Image: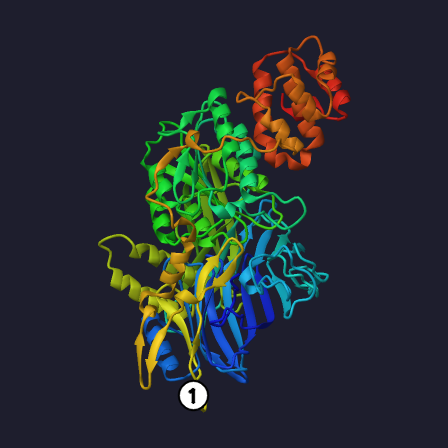
Amino acid sequence: MVNCGLVTQKNVPVPLKSISVEVLVQDHVSTVSSTLLYVNEEERPLEALFVFPLPADAAVCHFSAKIGEQEIVAELQNRETARDRYDDAVSSGQQAFLLEESAESPDVFGLSVGCLSPGQNAAVTIIYVTELDVQADHSLRFCLPGVLNPRYTPAGSGAGIVSEISSVCGAVPYTLTLSVHVSSPKPISKLESNCTLDPLVFLHSEHTQATVNLSPGHMFDKDVELFLYYQDPHQPSAIVEAGVATAPSGSLMRDPVVMISLYPEFLEEVMSSLATQGEFIFLMDRSGSMGEVMHHGIGAQTRIESAKDTLLLLLKSLPMGCYFNIFGFGSRFEAFSSYESVEYNQDTLDEALKSVKRMQADLCGTEILEPLKYIYSQRCKPNHPRQLFIFTDGEVGNTKEVLDLVKHHVHSHRCFSFGIGEGASTALITGMAREGSGHAQFITGTDRMQPKVMQSLRFALQPPVFNISVDWTLPDGVTVDTLSQPINVLFQGQRALIYAQLKGESSGGSEGTVTVKYRLKDQPVTNQLHFCLKPTEETGLSIHRLAARTRIRSLEQEERPCGADVESIRSKIVELSVQAGVSSVHTAFIAINKDSRQTVKGPLLQSAASDIHLGCDLLFLRDDICCSMMRTKGTRTRNKLNIGFMTKVRNFFRRGSKTAAAPTVQTNSQSKSDAAPDPQKDPLLQLVSLQKASGCWDLDVTLADAFGTTEDELTNQKPAQVEGSVWATLLALIWLYGCKIDQRVEWQFVAMKAASWIRSQKVGDLSECVCVGNVLLGCQVTKDTLGI
């Protein structure tokens, strides 16, 4: 069993004593301050490497370490310079800390801790700012990652701090405190959590500010999630933040920065007109970790079983005449159809459902690049826009290469990505959706996968929004420099944040206007927001830092094309990163305890982070990849550190693919097992599984079982003017609207197909049939509700 956190050479954890987290939410962004207190109980000095994930778009803006009573605040420097300083300090016996971002994946950071004396405490504080994700119910989600809230198995289990959280019980030897302060231009409706909270306290009668704390006794069995609800969530908002007076004139940190939040709501009559054409490709992770359970509650499904149920819903929801294909990937990949997507009809649907039944989490690693290359190599279907749905629970070592590939093909498809479990890489999931002009979703804890995926299917079927423009109207003397990338896509239920630097001084006006225009199904749409140019008080530079992070990400994109002035761009990144105090791939935080009166003596005990098990957002450590450094008095030789800490970490991301040869395409008909899974127990999925590709149901015993009745009863109650399939389909619609209305987002497309099929049968007035069906199924649904 391998432990997580900081460990010794003997795999004994450096004990974690306490975790303290403070969260400041401002409208749609948050500033998070996390302090972890460790103590070295070894008899020798300790050096360790601690690797952990953060949100992909987070901007780390502060890092400090308090050793005893001495606090060391890190400086942000050029990455190579910081590494050299760290090596020099550690080799001379000084206490030092190095925090750097992974070059391969921007949501992974590494913290090198050097020369922690025996018996000494180390309180490490990391502050970062990040945008909050919008959920399907319009709430904003904040998540405290598992690595900042480690899972713990009580003493006696032989496991220490590990990824297995099912046995968590009783007290743990450290404490967690979490406090949240919310401030927004919009009134706050409520704040919910998957954990127990103290009552929400409003600080003003307008309900624009509030505080809440995590209740004592948190069991450490899951990530801490908060869901924040604002009144009028679709109302655009703006926050203007003042700059720093001492920053260089004309710089980003000197001038005010405005953040515009756009969350448009499209006209219902336009959005109800969904596309009936398209090529839908489903790429499913079948690595070993997909065999883990979704959560540790009673009756939890494995990730692969939940994904299979979701695929069933997706396949049944597709429109007749479209094209589709299914791929499973791990160390190799398999395709439902060997060569290209097939037309959606009853025969191909039946074959696809058999393929889904055979799916297992049996393809080892997480090699996503090769199946993507294969998919993109296939010609698109004329008049059928390609929509790619990607499901994965893991992390890859070549995130940037994957994102480059998706971006290269952005004009030929849209990419919708789904991160399954707490450990899914935010950089990979959000990055693929961003580069593919799609939408990202995360399924964590007890979340149901189906509603989130079906929301993305609605996005994929929505009419395209095009000709998007953003225009600014400002007083004389004030100009604007937009820092965000151009908006390429807008969906119903999706938010866009725009960051802009305001330059100059107003000659009189105190208000600005931003206008967003676009066309939706040949209709012009305009969203306009007026905002005050006077900066908001006490914002703590979080908007500036996120704006800087946005600009840095844009520059990092420019680094990649061949022939670009890489050195010039890299210089701009380092300059902006250091000036704004936010992390980048080319900078690192370095902290050295220069005030220590004596050097740390004794042989240095080294340990390192190795295998990041992102399926649980936790860190595993193993001695065989420690960043060993050979030191002699007055000199030191860098050994493995030259290759970069993430090179070592990346090698273990591929832990499941050691036996894999070059990826090959294999059809699912070659699968070793054709065994069907247990019969479907969910009544909704049982009914949906019986629907035909055309949208109708057959009147038979399997339908009667789904309703909990007999075939004779269904047949005997059938009105004379309708034939069996019409009656069966009408009953299915009545049952969906009468018994499963709370899950409508999951079956909405199934019902639309069914209603369309009934209308195509031209059977006349069905009022009497609806009445009989209501009596038979114990429902009270009107004919108009059914859309027939």
For badge 1, the amino acid type reads Thr
Q: Position of residue 276 (x, y in %)?
A: 48, 26
Q: Nearer the viewer, residue 597 or 632?
A: 632
Q: Look at the image and tell me in which quarter the C terminus lies.
A: top right
> Which percent across, then down, holds residue 455?
55, 39
Against 221, is 469 above or below? above
Way the structure is coloured: rainbow
Indicate the quadrant where residue 742 lies: top right
In this picture, residue 662 sits left or right of residue 426: left
Position of 744 relative to 625 (above/below): above
Number of numbered discs: 1
> Where residue 93 sits in the image (x, y, percent)?
40, 84
Q: In the image, 206: left or right of 609?
A: right
Image: 82 above or below 306: below
Q: Is residue 398 visible?
A: yes
Q: What residue is shown at x 29% (from left), y 66% (from top)?
A: 571
- Pointer 1 residue: 599
Asked which quadrant contains residue 194, the reply is bottom right
Residue ID at (36%, 61%): 647
